[in-house]
Each structure stands twice: as structure tokens, then as C-alpha cells.
Image: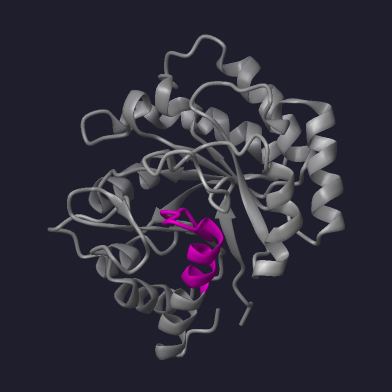
Amino acid sequence: MIKKKFGFIQGRMTQSKSKNILQFFPQKNWEKEISEANSYGFKFIEYFAERNINYKNPIWSKTGVNKINFLSKKFNIENYSFCEDFFINHDIKNYKNLNNYTNKLFRNLSKLKIKIYVLALFEKSDLNEQNYLSYSKILKNISNKLSKYKIKLALETNLSQKYLSIFFKKVNDKNINLVYDTGNRLKKNINQHNEIIKLKNKIIHVHIKDKNFSGKNVILGQGNVNFKSIFKSLKIIDYKGCFVFETNRGNNAIKTMINNIKTIKKISRSLNYEL
């Protein structure tokens, strides 16, 4: 069995100024995160584009991309995945500069040899039961662009398993897949175990977070996500992808993240599921 790799969302190993800000680019510490990640047991960092373009983010410049490549090679960190948050604030179907935006970004991702592009489809670009079929064309176009760089598209969405299955069948594109977010997909009336089993052929990436039924992102183990059930289902489908912590930092981001790995490994060992 291929040993799974752990990563974390960029910025989650850096303490934020406010406990309420979870997703932020660590402008002063992004280099430090790369230099320390491997020493804490991580194999990669999931870089991300913010909800509004920030040209201080190294992903947008040749110098920045070269710096990431230099540091990742120096500290034995793989450039594996990238999370797109920009379209949470901008309607992807009506964004006038979409081609310019994606062309530049995808070229830079290819220089980093990114393998998975996570596209978050929430808020302004929410993929839901009323509009999901209307996304087919634009997502196929994005997928085609990514395919040229050998990058897989992984959708992050709260669309139900039933409609996701219909959508994947309709779009019929092997390069369009799913990232399973353990926290975002938590609902009182949803059996996540069964959901994973039914979506098994499309799950290529997993975001680990814990939430309560009020939708609050909490420290791992303090919410309502049944991780034992989720990892049992991942073992059943023989999931061979990676795991990315998109977790609450707590009072100490580094200590919390170290505990995250210990917690997940303890659960997986109880299931005889090697991570």
C-alpha cells in the first residue's frame, strides 16, 4: 500500500491575529512554514489563492514561484496541491477576466509541478441543486486547461452526493474530481460513511477539519465529525490520496497541528489503516 502523505493549508501553522480568521496568507511567515513543515511530519503545503488577489502572494510572480521551488527542494517539501478561494468572492461563471486569471495561474502552478487544483465553489460561485448542470461547460473548459499541465481538478462543494453523482455522469470528464472535506460536508441528516462509499471513484483528495452542527470550525476532536467512521470508509474504498489539515489553530498553531497528526494516526491505527 502507498503510504499516505500529510499536508496543511498554507497559513495554518502560523498563528493569526484573530481566532476568527482561519484562512489567511502568512505574509511574513510563508517561507518559515516551508522550512519547518518537514520537521513536524508534513510532506507538503497546500498553497492557496486568496478571495481577492494579493500580489504579495508568491504564486503571482516569477520570483515568488522560483522561491517556493528553491525552498521546497531545500527542505524536502513536495509541491502537491493548490486551493482556489478566489471564486468564493467572484462569480466564476461571470468573471470577465477568467481566461487571463487562469492562464497566468495555471502556468505558475505547472512551474511548481502542482498535481491537484482544488476549486472551492461556495458563496458567489456556489454549486447547488438548482444550478449544478449549468457549471458543466465552464468546468470542462477549466479542466481542459489543467489537463495540458497534467493537473487534476478537484471540486470542493457542498452539493449533495445524489446530485454530485448526476453531475459527474453528465460532465463525463475523467479530470474533474472531488476533494472530500470532512467538516464542510458534515450535516445532521447525512451519513458521511455512505457518502464516501458512493463517491469513491471521484474522491482524489481529502481536507481534514472538524466542525460542529452549527457550522463552526473547531479544534480536531471537539466537533461532530465522526473521523473513525470516515476513515473506515476511506479504507473500504482503498483511498490512496493525501490528507490536508484545514483545521482550527487553537491557542498554539504548531502544537495543535502536531496533535492533529497524532489524533488521526491513532484513529487509523485502530482501524488497521496505514497512513
Task: Name above or below for residue 151 compared with residue 87.
Answer: below
Position of 16 relative to 41 (above/below)? above
Instruction: State the residue in front, 160 or 69.
Output: 69
The question of residue 72 being in magenta is answered with no
Report if residue 255 lies within the magenta region: yes
Color theme of the render: one colour
Residue 147 placement, left or right of 73: left
- Across and down, in percent, residue 193 comes to 28, 70
| Looking at the image, residue 105 lies above or below residue 229 | above
Foreground of the two, 193 or 248 = 248
Residue range (magenta): 244-261
Vertical placement of residue 30 versus 212, above or below? above
The C terminus, quarter of image = bottom right
Q: Looking at the image, which residue is at 18% across and 49% down?
A: 214
Q: Residue at x 49, y 80 (%)?
A: 265
Q: Residue 124: horizontal and vertical position, in percent?
A: 35, 23
Q: Residue at x 68, y 64 (%)?
A: 43
Q: 10 and 18: which one is in front? A: 18
Q: Quadrant of residue 196?
A: bottom left
Query: Residue 224's x, y, as percent?
Result: 23, 64
The quadrant of the image that shows the N terminus is bottom right
